[in-house]
């Protein structure tokens, strides 16, 4: 039972600390822009989903197509995304990052790289291997 409590505390605290730090840092990085961490994560999903159809992105983010439509409309207005209608099937709409959208993704990816580098720099090679194996099992469990 103690193991479960420790694991629970770790995951809850790690998630909250990382998300809070990420939000704070993204606010500083994009201080002159009106973009939220939620919008940045939508851009990230567009960048990592192929094909980048609205349905595929909504599924990746575990949100409804309707709520994604609202958010992507704002991102299009802000100049971070474009939307194209499929010429063969007008019901299919795909999203693409603009130059500004790619710039946001590059900054966000760099933040994550720095976070991981910072954490792993405190560990030995053996500890890194151990945590990588543990995280693979955790990820497998999340994907069930």
Image (cartoon, helix red, strand yellow):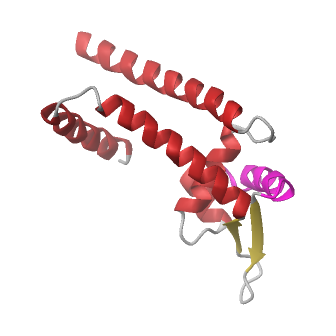
- Magenta includes 5? no
Residue furthest bottom in the image: 88
Q: Quadrant of the N terminus?
A: top left
Q: Is residue 12 above or below residue 76?
A: above
Residue at (87% x, 56% y) in the render: 77
The answer to whether residue 38 is left or right of residue 13 is right
Residue at (40% x, 24% y) in the render: 11
Q: Nearer the viewer, residue 55 or 81?
A: 81
Q: Position of residue 16 (x, y in %)?
A: 52, 23
| Residue 117 can be seen, yes or no | yes
Residue at (44% x, 23% y) in the render: 14
Q: Is residue 113 above or below residue 10?
A: below
Residue at (76% x, 75% y) in the render: 84
Name the dominant secondary structure of the magenta segment. helix
Q: Nearer the viewer, residue 70 or 117?
A: 117
Please report the bounds of the magenta region as a residue range.
63-79
Q: Is residue 32 above or below residue 71?
A: above
Q: Position of residue 56 (x, y in %)?
A: 58, 64
Query: Which quadrant of the view contains residue 88?
Result: bottom right
The answer to whether residue 143 is left or right of residue 97 is left
């Amino acid at each position: 039972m103690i193991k479960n409590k420790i694991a629970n505390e770790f995951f809850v605290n790690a998630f909250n600390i990382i998300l809070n730090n990420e939000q704070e840092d993204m606010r500083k990085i994009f201080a002159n822009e009106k973009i939220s961490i939620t919008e940045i994560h939508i851009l990230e999903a567009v960048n990592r989903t192929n094909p980048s159809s609205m349905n595929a992105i909504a599924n990746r983010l575990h949100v409804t197509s309707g709520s994604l439509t609202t958010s992507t409309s704002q991102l299009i207005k802000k100049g971070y995304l474009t939307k194209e209608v499929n010429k063969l099937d007008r019901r299919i709409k795909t999203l693409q990052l603009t130059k500004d959208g790619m710039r946001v993704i590059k900054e966000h990816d760099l933040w994550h790289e720095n976070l991981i580098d910072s954490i792993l720099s405190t560990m030995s090679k053996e500890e890194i291997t151990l945590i990588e194996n543990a995280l693979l099992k955790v990820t497998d469990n999340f994907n069930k």
